[in-house]
Image (spheres, helix red, strand yellow):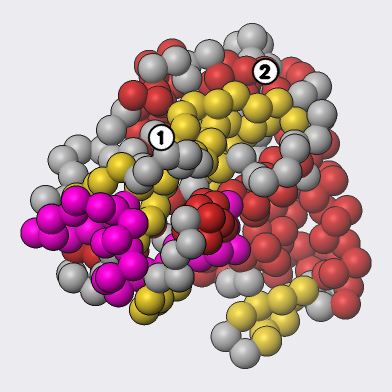
Amino acid sequence: MDMRFLESFVTVVESGSIADAARRLDLAPTTVAQQIRALEADLGSRLLMRAGRTVKATVAGARIVDHARQLLEGVQTLRSAASDTGLPAGPLRLGATPTALTGLLPPLMRRWMHAYPDIRIYIEPGTSSLLLERVQTGHLDAAILVHPAFDLPKTCAWSLIRQEPLMLLTPSRMRVSDPLLTIARHPFIQYDRKVVAGKMADDYLRRQGLRPKVQFELDGIEHIAQLVAEGFGVSVLPDWPLLGASDARVRRWPLPAPCPSRKVGMVWMRGSPRSPLADALHAHLDGIAAAR
């Protein structure tokens, strides 16, 4: 049995699409489809079926997908143990939130590629909660994410990269003498209260006795910033990092103390056979917090 075929099967199940799986695996969709057919012929069972516009596992496929993951993880551990580079075999599987991808990750990746040019990097974007789950299940070696509102398990290692205080974001033409009064008077774009910083912002405004006139509520700091730039309202967001020049159409204003901050850092599993990769990445974090 070819492990590459098992990897293609698991990736299709996780992504729900042969085309998406092919992009993740850097293969042609026809190649992925051929590998799945070969695996089905080897096992004597149909493993995937169409469900509308998506692809999902059959009953037989659902039975073996966890076993397939365990086999793939075992092979990866075997390769890591056999590596003669001093580090587990690549790639480094790194998760990152959207704001980390555009603000914190590029300088970190430059440092990594300079130090370890032969160990390639696989980067998976996602929400903080999803990335934390994938680190804990071993699908990712590490992730750069927002610390959850609860304590991390002791099996997780955590390194703080930066703290991002809440701030008021307005169109650049708007003049602000009192940030709280500005929030009360203008249409408000609410950061999704299901994410850590969104709940933090909502709690802060409630403590200030404010009930802003919410026009929209959505996740995605960049999307909210775009709406503010277009004049749809103001918002309270964490002071996220930027790579390159900031958007001249928006302006950031500090909020009255006490103002909470979200914590952005790197998480990985202690004692994992692949933790040396995360430890090596962690060694290059110094100074990354200053990236703007």
The structure residue drawn at horizontal position 13% and vertical position 55%, both measured from the top left corner, is 175
Residue annotated with mark 2: 276
Quadrant placement of the C terminus: top left
Query: What is the magenta range?
Result: 168-196
The structure residue drawn at horizontal position 35% and vertical position 45%, both measured from the top left corner, is 255
- Where residue 125 appears, as percent x and y from the top left, is 50, 51
* Frontmost residue, 27 versus 166: 166
* Frontmost residue, 159 versus 57: 159
- Secondary structure beneath dot 2 equals helix
Res 39 → quadrant: bottom right
> Is residue 78 among the parts visible in the rendering?
no
Q: Amino acid at mark 1?
A: Leu
Q: Residue furthest bottom?
A: 52
Q: Which label lies toward us, 2 or 1? A: 1
Q: Amino acid at mark 2?
A: Pro
- Secondary structure beneath dot 1 equals helix
The structure residue drawn at horizontal position 9% and vertical position 59%, both measured from the top left corner, is 173
The structure residue drawn at horizontal position 57% and vertical position 85%, both measured from the top left corner, is 53
* Frontmost residue, 36 versus 177: 177
Q: Examine the rendered structure and indicate whether residue 150 appears above or below residue 119.
A: below
Q: Residue furthest front?
A: 209
> Is residue 57 among the parts visible in the rendering?
yes
Residue annotated with mark 1: 105
Crowding at dot 2, Cα within 10 Å, few <14 / some 14-19 / many 20+, comes out as some
The answer to whether residue 186 is magenta is yes
**Is 207 on the left-hand or right-hand side of 103?**
right
**Is 6 on the left-hand or right-hand side of 74?**
left
Sequence-wise first label, 2 or 1: 1
The answer to whether residue 11 is magenta is no
